Amino acid sequence: MILVKTLEELQNKLNDLRSLGTIGFVPTMGALHKGHLSLVEKSATDNKTVVVSIFVNPTQFNNPKDLERYPRTLETDLKLLETTSCNIVFAPNAREVYPEPDTRKFNFGELETVMEGKHRPGHFNGVAQVVSKLLDMVQPDKAYFGLKDFQQLAIIKSMVKQLELPVEIIPCSIVREDNGLAMSSRNELLTAEQRANAAFINNTLSKIKEQKGLKSVEEITNWAIETINKNPFLTVEYFEIVDDEQLQPINNWNDKKTMIGCVAAFCGKVRLIDNIIFN
C-alpha cells in the first residue's frame, strides 16, 4: 500500500496499474471503521487495484462547527488500511482538490428538497462537487458507497448520470456495531453512554418493519418519532417513509414502490442517520 497526496503522484501510479485490470475506488472522509473496510474488501473482490481517498470536504458542511468537530485520524486510518487489500491511499489537501473555487451548481430536483436536503441546505451540492472531482482524478471503473447514506447514494447516481461519467456505482450494505448502531465516523464523538443509547434508533426501526401494514404510514411515522424522542439521549430531526428512487413520501402501504424508512436524530450534539428498507 502506498500513500500519495497529489494528483500528479496519483495519476503516475495509476497509469502503471490500469493495464493490469479494473480500478475500484472507495471515497471517504477518514475516521475509518469496519464499514469503510468492508467497502475496501468488496472493491478488492471486484477489481485488480483499490484506491481509497481520505479527504474531509469543506464544501459539504453547511455548519462550520460540524466541519470543525469532524474527526481527523490519518495515521490511525493508514494503519487500518494496511490490514486490507487497499493498494493506494489518496490523501490530498483542500488546495489539491480545489485549486480554484468550485462554483458549479447541480440540480437534483426533488431528490435534494427532502430529508437531508431540507435540513442541510447546500450539503448535496458539496457532495456532488467533491465526488465528481475525485472520480475525475481517479477515473475508476467502479466506486463503492454504503447504504447508510441512502440519500447521498441517490444523489451520486444522479450526478454520475448527469455528467455521463464512465463509472459504475456499487451500493454496499450497512455495517452495524454489535448493539445495532450503524457504523459511522461520528460515533467516535459519542460517550460510552451515548453510544449505548444511540442503538435505540435501529431498535426502533426494526420494530417499525414488524408493524408494516398493521398501522397506517402516518401512524407508524408518528409512533417512530415519539418512541425515539422518549429516549432522553435522542432528539429526532426527521423520520420519513419514502420511495427508494426519488425519496418522496409514501402515503400508504399499497404503493408498489420499494419503501425505505429514513431517520436523522441528534445524540447530544452528534447527528446520526440510519434507514431500513421495507421489502
Image (tube, grey):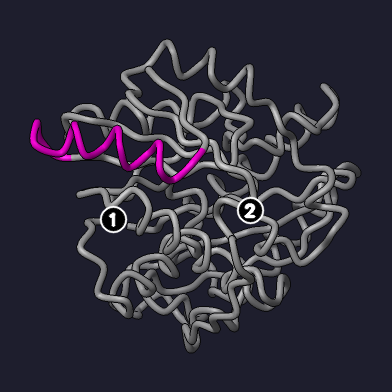
Query: Image quadrant of residue 65?
Result: bottom right
Q: In the drawing, does residue 14 fall left or right of residue 104?
A: left
Circle 2 packing at 10 Å, graded few (<14), some (14-19), many (20+), is: few
Whether residue 66 appears in magenta in the rendering, the answer is: no
- Name above or below for residue 115 compared with residue 31: below
Q: Mark 2 — residue?
A: 95
* Type of amino acid under label 1: Ile
Choose the circle earlier in sequence order: 2 or 1: 2
The span shown in magenta is 6-22
Q: Tell whether label 1 touches label 2 (CB within 8 Å).
A: no
Q: Mark 1 — residue?
A: 169
Residue drawn where x is 56% and y is 61% of the image: 262
Residue drawn where x is 26% and y is 40% of the image: 24
Which part of the image, by quadrant, shows the N terminus? top left
Residue drawn where x is 45% and y is 63% of the image: 260
* Type of amino acid under label 2: Arg
Name the dominant secondary structure of the magenta segment. helix
- In what element is the residue under mark 2? helix
Closer-to-camera residue (36/214): 36
Q: In the drawing, does residue 63 fall left or right of residue 44?
A: right
